[in-house]
Image (tube, rainbow, N blue to C red):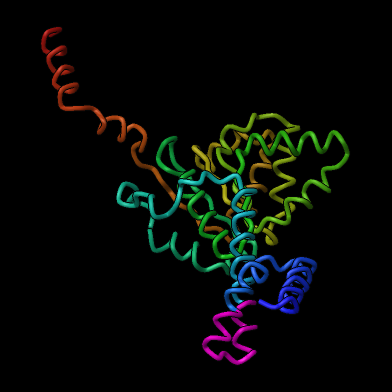
Amino acid sequence: MSAAAHAGNARLDLMLLELRLPTVRRLAGDLCVQSDREGWPAHRLLEALLEHEMNERESRRIERHRAESGLSPDKRLSSFDFAAVPSVSKAQVTALAEGHEWLDRGANVLLFGPPGVGKSHLVCALGHALIEAGRRVLFTRCSDLVQRLQAARRDLRLPQELTRLDRFDLLILDDLSYVRRDQAETSVLFELIAERYERKSLAITANTPFSQWGEVFVDPAMTLAAVDRLVHHSTILEMNVESYRRRTATAAQTPTSRARKTQTTTAES
């Protein structure tokens, strides 16, 4: 390669560095050689370079959003056992994952069922699918977020904290039932629900039905108002089946251990 060609390549490399086009910078040499060899029109070369840049930017953006989401990395729809929870429609969940109109109108998803039935897995899987579709999601234990909002209120910055949460299309509050029945805590939770009402979506998991939410919200009027806002424009998934963790533990017992247990029971009898 001539000195002029080396100088040209160096100049191009500096320009791409300055323009922050790392993928184009990395691939330009090989694609230019391929273009010269195969006689590409100029627009094809430019299109190929920019397409690679856009695709890699999208991949990096999705990974950033996945990292900030707090979602468990291994809880995906592909690993959720719908057969074990017949009350949940796979088609309905798939529609939520693939059709995002409900996010645009601030609709909610509410998941109810006893501990261990897969509520967190299912809502995390939905979150991952939405991130892959370009949405922003935040997963948090409900009690942790309430503590964060309560601290913000004490510091007179609750409005700013609520505004920061607005950047997430879906805010997942896991285990609402474990929020303490405390006026200060439940009031900030209600403010969050009211602030996002019909604007931004919430997904909430709870071990208890609405009839027992008086154990979370101190004021009966606040309980009714919170339920009203959440149920309006919502999808409710009932998961009242045997605990998945209990089923897994039972299935994991070896035939030998089950036989020993039977022998012990017989001997004690």
Where residue 262 sits: x, y (%)? Answer: 14, 18
Where residue 46 sits: x, y (%)? Answer: 65, 83
Q: How many marks?
A: 0
Which residues lie in the magenta part?
32-50
Q: Is residue 241 above or below residue 181?
A: below
Name the residue located 87 percent from the left edge and 35 percent from the top edge: 155
Res 210 visible? yes
- Front residue of this view, candidates 108 and 230: 108
Q: Is residue 179 above or below residue 68?
A: above
Name the residue located 79 percent from the left edge and 34 percent from the top edge: 151
Report which quarter residue 168 is drawn in: bottom right
Where residue 175 sits: x, y (%)? Answer: 55, 38
Q: Is residue 248 left or right of residue 158?
A: left
Q: Is residue 40 magenta?
A: yes
Per the picture, the main secondary structure of the magenta-coloured stretch is helix
Q: Is residue 78 left or right of residue 140?
A: left
Name the residue located 26 percent from the left edge and 31 percent from the top edge: 252
Report which quarter residue 263 is drawn in: top left
Q: Is residue 191 magenta?
A: no
Q: Is residue 163 left or right of residue 206?
A: right
Where residue 24 sits: x, y (%)? Answer: 66, 71
Q: Residue furthest right?
A: 156
- Front residue of this view, candidates 9 and 71: 9
Name the quarter where the C terminus is drawn: top left
Res 104 visible? no
Name the residue located 66 percent from the left edge and 76 percent from the top edge: 1
Q: Residue furthest top?
A: 268
Q: Is residue 217 above or below residue 258?
A: below
